[in-house]
Image: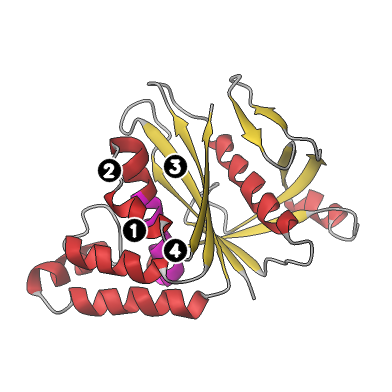
Amino acid sequence: MEFAYLDESGDLGPNGSRNLVLTLMCTRKKKEISRVIRDAKKRLLDHNKTARWLSRKGEIKFYSFPDKDLLKRTLRKLADIEMNVYFIFFEKDGTAINADIKQTILTHLFRHIMKKPDRTIDKVIADLSFFNKEKLNRFILQSYTSKPVKLKNDKGLEFDAEYGKVTFSRLSAEEFEKAKDDISNTIVEIEHYNSRLSDELQALDLISGSIFAFVEHGNKEYFDLISKSKVKIDGVKFQ
């Protein structure tokens, strides 16, 4: 079984971070990833200071991780697990980003599936409120062209799509009932999970945070730990 996980680093607002990073992790190694995160939690509980941090956060997070050496060891262990990581990053240029822009990460999910026609994703899980506050989101493939083109949103921003133009739109519950029985439709169901209850989303937070540190601050220290490994990373700038 293969699972896909979605997370973000940065924010949508005009202030705060200079960039927004959307990250997708596809893997069949769910148990191995969970084992790494649980081991990191055990190490954090060995010391009062780091145990208090974990108790406050309630989960593993890249931001303010209290033990840099443990963070690096954890990233190295994750890097030794087979997975595909895709990311898109946006330069905000002091302006707010429309939340609908997050749908662009589905392009990477579609690309991942198209690389191997027999590949199936058993479940797609997003961090809480990635798209909205609904537990389940459904998107339908509207159009797909095989020739690589530029994708453009309503602000005139463009980025290259290796497998052509891919457009998804959200389905309401009523629209889903009408579309689900047509085998010609490509529908992606995405569940929102509380990351405190998901070791895999916590692992992705570490990976997404490492990418964000590179994009936002030019700090490659953590990014290099995951990029020179069994992890296959593919990123693109939305421009």
Q: CA distance from mark 3 to mark 1?
A: 18 Å
Please name the residue that numbered disc 3 is placed on: 21
Amino acid, disc 4: Leu
- Residue 215: image x %, image y %? 37, 38
Q: Residue at x 38, y 25 (%)?
A: 14
- Looking at the rendered image, the disc whose residue lies closer to the viewer, 3 or 4, is 3
Nearest to N terminus: mark 2 or mark 4: 4
- Looking at the rendered image, the disc whose residue lies closer to the viewer, 2 or 4, is 2
Any part of residue 4 in sight: yes
Q: Residue at x 30, y 69 (%)?
A: 74
The reply to whether callout 2 and callout 4 are in contact (CB within 8 Å) is no
Q: Main secondary structure of the magenta part?
A: helix
Q: Is residue 101 above or below residue 74?
A: above
Please name the residue that numbered disc 2 is placed on: 219
Nearest to N terminus: mark 2 or mark 3: 3
Amino acid, disc 3: Val
Q: Quadrant of residue 196?
A: bottom left
Label at residue 201: 4
Give the quadrant of the C terminus: top right
Q: CA distance from mark 1 to mark 2?
A: 12 Å
Any part of residue 198 in sight: no
Range of the magenta residues?
A: 197-210
Please name the residue that numbered disc 1 is placed on: 225
Q: Which residue, as the protein is rendered here, is positioned at the far left?
A: 48
Question: Is 184 on the left or on the right of 144, as rendered?
Answer: right
Label at residue 107: none
Q: Residue at x 22, y 59 (%)?
A: 65
Nearest to N terminus: mark 1 or mark 2: 2
Query: Quick one: SS at disc 3?
Result: strand
Q: CA distance from mark 3 to mark 4?
A: 15 Å
